[in-house]
Structure formats: C-alpha cells, structure tokens
Image (cartoon, rainbow, N blue to C red):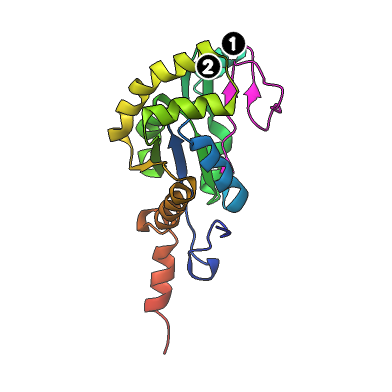
Amino acid sequence: MTDSPNADLPSDRIQRRGLMLVLSSPSGAGKSTIARNLLETDPGLELSVSVTTRQRRASEIDGVHYHFLARREFERLRDSDELLEWAEVHGNYYGSPREPVERAMSDGRDILFDIDWQGAHQLAEKMRADVVSIFVLPPSMAELKARLHRRAEDDEETIQKRLSNAATEIEQWRTYDYVIVNDDLDRAFSAVQAIVRAERLRRDRRPGLFEFVDGLLNEEL
C-alpha cells in the first residue's frame, strides 16, 4: 500500500484527523512483522516510539526502536501524565509518550502502536474515538511455540514464560475492534491494510467534510 495520509480523500482537499492504529498479539503471533511491513509500505503511517526500561538488544537503536530509560525517569514521565499508556511486561516498563502522538493526530497523521493489551486498554479509555484496535491470533498454540523457537531471540526459560502468558493475552481478543488469525502472513497483512483504508474514510475522522459539503451545496452551476 503506497497511499499518502490523505490518499483516500478527494484530491487531498478534505481535512482529516489522524487515527491511532493499535496492533496487539501474544509474542510470536506476528504483530511486529505486520507492523514493520505497514511502516515500509504505507508512508501515511508512522510509529509511536515507546519508552522502556528494558535493556537494549544489540540490534536495536535508541530513539528508533525504543527510547531506553532508567526506571526512575520512566516513573517521572508516568507520574506527570506524560504517557498515554504504560504497562509492566515481563518485568520491564513500556509506555507511549503523549506529546508527539497528540501533535501528529492534529496534523492528520496516523500513528501505529505495537503494544500489548494493557496499553491498548489504556489508549481506548483515554482516546476511544481515535483508536482502531486489531488483535492478531496465531493459528494454533503449537505454531506459536514453533515461531518463538524459530526466531531464536530468547532462551528457553523466556520462551516458556511467553507461552504461559499467551493464554491471558489471547483472552483479551473480545475487547478489540478487529481480530485477525495469522495463518498466512500475506493474507493477514492484506486484511490489516483493508482495515486502515476503511477507517481513514470514516465520517467522524474527517472534520473537513463540513466545509467540503458546504462548498458543494453552494456551488454555482
């Protein structure tokens, strides 16, 4: 998908408020791959770069993959309401900074959140009209386990911890707007693209329609 932020609108003339696209899944179900593909193919989407107290992995760049913070600094942001959402996952804190997201939304830019169900719930509580939430399910628990082993990022103890947490995470599927079973990555990705296209055209995300329709009705023929 190569559309600009307003590619679905007539001649880019209609003012639109950005949306918050939330992708969640248990570890290994595929949300991060889908998120990466979206960011590579859709210039209208930009990633909300989370802050975290987790240690940086060798392949990660501070400020690109995450903003890596000391626990004390994270708690300062949390306590001063500078985070839209935050959660403790596998013993580490994660959160989404408020200011860059709110600035992008008012400019009509769409923000992608690759976050867990706890963060998704907090976003929905604070900004429900702006949130579009998608939960990605694995085709089976056996396949989920196999994917965690294939990606070879975690030791066996961590993999078992992720699998034990997966049931709790999957139980949250009912709270999401859309649910996709990722049994085929191309099909799952196409489904997410279709959701984004439709949500960008929602009437309540396009305040510029009032002026556009007034112009139509007042047009001299």
Residue 221 visible to an observer of this rendering: yes
Query: Is 175 positioned to the left or the right of 80 in the image?
Result: left
Q: Which residue occupies the foreground of this view, 219 or 138? A: 138
Give the secondary structure at mark 2: strand
Q: Main secondary structure of the magenta part?
A: loop
Q: Is residue 111 above or below residue 50?
A: below
Residue lying furthest left:
174
Residue 91 visible to an observer of this rendering: no
Q: Is residue 68 magenta?
A: yes
> Label for residue 158?
none
Residue at figure coordinates x 55%, y 49% from the top left: 109
- Of the 4 image quadrants, the one containing the N terminus is bottom right
Residue 57 image position (x, y, % from top left): 67, 21
For label 1, the residue is 71
Magenta-drawn segment: 46-72
For label 2, the residue is 93
Residue at figure coordinates x 58%, y 59% from the top left: 2
Q: Name the residue type under label 2.
A: Tyr
Q: Name the residue type under label 1.
A: Arg
Residue at figure coordinates x 67%, y 33% from the top left: 64
Residue 54 image position (x, y, % from top left): 60, 16
Could you tell me if the residues under marks 2 and 1 are in contact, i.e. CB atoms within 8 Å? yes
Q: Which residue occupies the foreground of this view, 150 or 25? A: 150
Residue at figure coordinates x 40%, y 77% from the top left: 216
Mark-to-mark CA distance, 2 and 1: 8 Å
